[in-house]
Structures are given as structure tokens and as C-alpha cells.
Amino acid sequence: MKPWIYKLAIVMVILILAVGGCRKAGSRLVKADDPQHADVMVMLVGSIVDRLLQTADLYAEGVAGKVWIVETGMRANSALEERGVKLDSYSRQACNALISLGIPADSIVILPGDATSTRMEAQVIRDYLRTQTGIDTVLLVSSSEHTRRAFKIFEAAFSPLEEPPTLYCSSNSYTKFNSEKWWRDRDDIQEVVMEYLKMVNFALFEKRELRREE
């Protein structure tokens, strides 16, 4: 085993043990700014139902008049396409759902990117911002347990910009994750452990790479 892999494994084990004994671990994953206004909302594609509903509510409240979604990768569908079957990507499905929830089609922008991770979504959004003007505030809409890590990833991705926009996260009232009593539910326990492992990966590898990108 390579030394760095061994050290990473030790860190992960210690982290899991620490998380298991910390009741506030769930709350620390949640970042909820809830600004009164943002120039654009970025809806991250993942646990899609809660994010769709939260985005629709924020739009209806007038928090932001624009929604950006990064096209997600669906490479596993290539076998279907070879047989003449084409499925809409999750991003396209999300767009259609948002329209059904009352957001006008011309307020939604789907950015090409074939993204398969939050990091890739952040990179696509950053590159698109370089072509835009007047975007001073960006509101991330995600599942509650994902907001802290998403914020850190986007913050690092935006750092190479000359004038990075102010970045916010929205709380999500539709997420089932119980941040206060996460240890009582098996799914919540898995979410907490996985999020902290991903945070370790971000801190060790992704953050430095994102800040270096031009």
C-alpha cells in the first residue's frame, strides 16, 4: 500500500469514528443563508425531487428570476441509444418539471457539460460566468446535507475568477435528512458518513486543483 493511501485510510477511519460520536455532525453539513435576492439560482442535480420543489418555491417568492442547470452525464444510456431508444437526461427532466411547477422556460438555462459530479457542475458554471455580465450573487439549491460541501466546491472553483460572485446556499425544507437527530436513521447515518468522506477527498485533492485552474 502506498504511504499516502495508508494515511488517507487512517484519516477516514478516524473521521468515521469521530462523526459517529458527534451529534452535531449532521448540522455542520448544512449551510443555509437564505438571501432575499440572488441574480441566479444554480440547481444542482442529484436528489432531484427536493431540489425541484425548493427551486420552484424560491422562484415563486421572487428570490431569483433565473435558474441554471448543468447538463448531467448519462453515459450508461449509450447502449439504449444504439437500439434507437433515447432518454432525456436528468437535467432535461428537471427543466421540464420546473416548467410544470410554474417557472417560464425562458428563465431556465441548461448548460452543456456532461457533468457527473458537483465539481464538474462548479467548473461548468464558472466557465459560463466568464461569458456573462451582471451576475454578482449566485444561490446554490441542493439537498440540505449537501449544501456545505457544495459551497466549498463552488467557492474553490470560483476563486480563479477576477471578480467572483457572492455565493449563497438555500436551506431545503423538502429534504428528509434530519440534521439534528441524524444518528437515529440508517439512511441519515450513511449520508453523514459519505458526506464527510467526500469532504476529506475535497480537502486533500479537489480544492487545490480547482484553485489552480484558469
Image: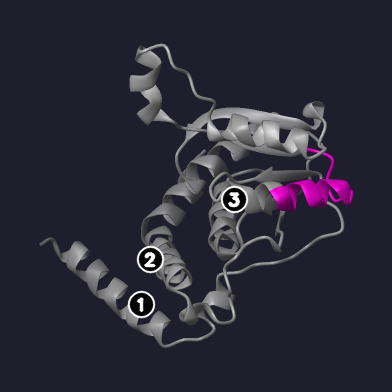
The disc placed on residue 197 is: 2
Label 1 crowding class (10 Å Cα cut-off): few <14, some 14-19, many 20+?
some
Query: Label 1: which residue?
Result: 15
Query: Label 3: which residue?
Result: 159
Identity, as a three-letter code, of the amino acid under mark 1: Leu
Please name which of the two marks, 1 or 3, marks the residue nearer to the observer: 1
Task: Report the Cα–Cα distance between label 2 and label 3.
Answer: 23 Å
Label 3 crowding class (10 Å Cα cut-off): few <14, some 14-19, many 20+?
some
Mark 2: secondary structure: helix
Q: Is residue 201 above or below residue 70?
A: below
> Does 20 appear in magenta?
no
Image point 74% across, 65% down: which residue?
Answer: 33
Residue range in magenta is 53-66
Image point 67% across, 43% down: which residue?
Answer: 162
Label 2 crowding class (10 Å Cα cut-off): few <14, some 14-19, many 20+?
some
Q: Check contact, mark 1 vs mark 3: CB within 8 A.
A: no
Image point 60% across, 65% down: which residue?
Answer: 176
Please state the horizontal and vertical placement of residue 202, each as a whole percent of the image: 43, 58
Q: Is residue 165 visible?
A: no
Q: Check contact, mark 2 vs mark 3: CB within 8 A.
A: no
Q: Closer to the camera, 169 or 93?
A: 93
Q: Closer to the camera, 94 or 132?
A: 94
Question: Can you tell which quarter of the image residue 143 is in?
Answer: bottom right
Q: Is residue 4 visible?
A: yes
